[in-house]
Amino acid sequence: MNTEHIPDSRRPSDPIFSMDAKAATEALQAKHQAYLASERPGYDIAKPATSEQARNRLDALTSDPVWRNRFEAHDSVARAEFHALTNLSAEGGSVAHALAGIVPPGGIHTGPGADLAQMADAVPFFRELGIGDGIISELLSDKPSSPLEARLAREWRDRHLKDEAWVKRWNSGDPVARREMVLCSMVIAAGPEL
């Protein structure tokens, strides 16, 4: 871009404006990749270690036209990388993806329990209640409660529902009471039926 006609005080300071089109395109692509790498863990990692990093790396590769052309041309290295990243991405499972907010478009739910989108929608609700990711992971994993856990939760619920002060706090939206009742209800729901 020729900026000679622009007064110095109004001239863009970024050196990209003094580059030719090819150099400016390459510089913008490098800036874009640096931004993506800073915002998405694993985007620039050649060998990601987690399912989230693998998903982000796969997104980076599939948006790269050079890599995509290699993949579509059945390049064995690109295909192997794709399969390795896909497998690692899937290892996290639905619960890990829900916690990370990874919900691929067009997913098909084939198993019991909530689908991935429903689990991902529930995560902010649980976090807002002050429930940590470890507990959220257990709640979403379809892990059954033991008969003892379910019985103790029912006893706790029955005892607290008879306590007028606790019920008043719960009905008024007290965050501690809400968290207690949600956790209790989840334990009961995951337990054996009476």
Image (cartoon, rainbow, N blue to C red):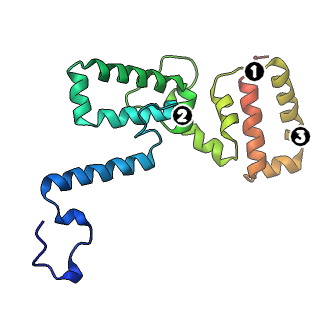
Q: Which residue is mark 1?
A: 191
Q: CA distance from mark 1 to mark 2?
A: 23 Å
Q: Amino acid at mark 1?
A: Gly
Would you call the spot at circle 3 few (<14 residues within 10 Å), some (14-19), or many (20 or more)? Answer: few
Q: Position of residue 38 (x, y in %)?
A: 44, 49
Q: Position of residue 44 (x, y in %)?
A: 40, 40
Q: Are marks 1 and 3 in contact (CB under 8 Å)?
A: no
Q: Amino acid at mark 2?
A: Ala
Q: CA distance from mark 1 to mark 3?
A: 22 Å
Q: Quadrant of residue 137?
A: top right
Q: Quadrant of residue 21?
A: bottom left
Residue mark closest to the camera, 3 vs 2: 2
Q: Which residue is mark 3?
A: 162
- Which type of secondary structure does the marked residue at label 3 adopt? loop
Q: Image quadrant for the N terminus?
A: bottom left
Residue at image coords 25%, 20%: 75
Q: Which residue is mark 2?
A: 98
Q: Amino acid at mark 3?
A: Lys
Q: Is residue 35 visible?
A: yes
Q: Earlier in the sequence, mark 1 or mark 3?
A: 3
Q: Position of residue 168 (x, y in %)?
A: 81, 51
Is 8 displayed left or right of 139 in the figure?
Answer: left
> In front: 23, or 69?
23
Residue at image coords 45%, 20%: 87
Residue at image coords 72%, 52%: 173
